[in-house]
């Protein structure tokens, strides 16, 4: 499981780990963006929360997640990215008999987050994530992986970024203590470069898996 503020690098870093251990990353943010794109009733409802930087109600998101985890590609393990976002969601996992083996908490201060999210550009097709200055695509505004034109996420507007940070501190941050008490936590300080953070996570996980 990956914990951390929006923009701390959870999505990017969890993908590296997923590739290394050959397991899928299950990102509730990605599931939600797909449902918004599909224009269904649930998608429209989800959009009203996402666009304001608010969390989607627990009953909706928990149902979506548990349905996804029942798919066969999750049989040999998976990485959770963006779930749980509050204690109620963490309890829903406990009730479903799901206990994370390791919780990676990426620490990043608010200034870094505002800069990261403000400059973030994402691919609407494959969800690859870039930053205008720190992790720029090879060709300006174009995804390196699939050639699609990059966009700014609806929730990466300045006023929405501040709201998401507020929600993070009030609702998600208590999970650090929740998993700390269960001795599951591996804290990693976000580095200036994506590769620097990836190395810390990779080394830390190897050590934990060996023991
Ligand atoms: P993310 O891509 O993880 O930053 O998620 C984008 C947005 O989707 C969040 O700001 C929330 O509005 C919504 N979202 C994602 N995961 C959850 C969750 N576990 N619970 C509630 N809302 C979520």
Image (cartoon, rainbow, N blue to C red):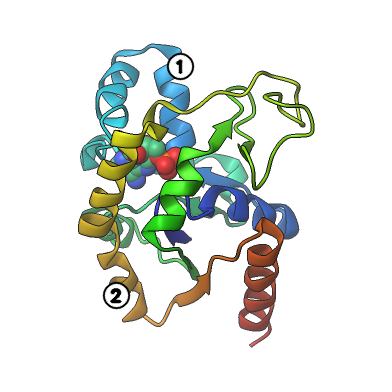
* Residue 184 position in % (x across, y down): 44, 77
Q: Nearer the viewer, residue 111 or 84?
A: 111
Q: Nearer the viewer, residue 89 or 71?
A: 89
Quarter occupied by the C terminus: bottom right
| Residue sitting at x 25%, y 23% | 48
Q: Is residue 144 left or right of residue 115?
A: right
Distance from Cα at disc 1 to Cα at disc 2: 35 Å
| Residue sitting at x 29%, y 44% | 162
Q: Earlier in the sequence, mark 1 or mark 2?
A: 1
Q: Is residue 63 visible?
A: no
- The response on whether ligand 1 sits within 8 Å of label 2 is no
* Residue 136 position in % (x across, y down): 69, 39
Residue receiving disc 2: 177
* Residue 108 position in % (x across, y down): 45, 63
Q: Secondary structure at mark 1?
A: helix
| Residue sitting at x 58%, y 51% | 75
Q: Secondary structure at mark 2?
A: helix
Residue receiving disc 1: 37
The answer to whether residue 48 is above or below residue 57 is above
Dividing the picture into quadrants, the one containing residue 57 is top left
**Ligand 1 position by quadrant:** top left
């Amino acid at each position: 499981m990956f914990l951390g503020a929006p923009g701390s690098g959870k999505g990017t870093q969890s993908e590296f780990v997923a590739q290394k251990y050959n397991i899928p990353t299950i990102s509730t943010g990605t599931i939600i963006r797909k449902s918004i794109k599909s224009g269904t009733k649930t998608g429209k409802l989800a959009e009203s929360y996402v666009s304001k930087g608010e969390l989607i109600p627990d009953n909706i998101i928990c149902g979506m997640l548990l349905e996804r985890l029942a798919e066969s590609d999750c049989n040999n393990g998976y990485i959770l990215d963006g779930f749980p976002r509050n204690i109620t969601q963490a309890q829903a996992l406990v009730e479903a008999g799901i206990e994370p083996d390791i919780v990676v908490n990426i620490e990043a201060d608010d200034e870094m987050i505002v800069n990261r999210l403000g400059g973030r550009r994402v691919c609407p097709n494959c969800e690859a994530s870039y930053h205008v200055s720190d992790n720029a695509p090879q060709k300006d505004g174009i995804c390196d992986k699939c050639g699609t034109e990059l966009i700014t996420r609806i929730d990466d507007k300045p006023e929405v970024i501040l709201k998401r940070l507020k929600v993070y501190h009030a609702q998600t941050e208590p999970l650090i203590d929740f998993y700390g008490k269960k001795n599951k936590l591996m804290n990693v300080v976000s580095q200036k470069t994506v590769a620097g953070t990836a190395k810390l996570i990779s080394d830390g996980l190897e050590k934990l898996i060996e023991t």
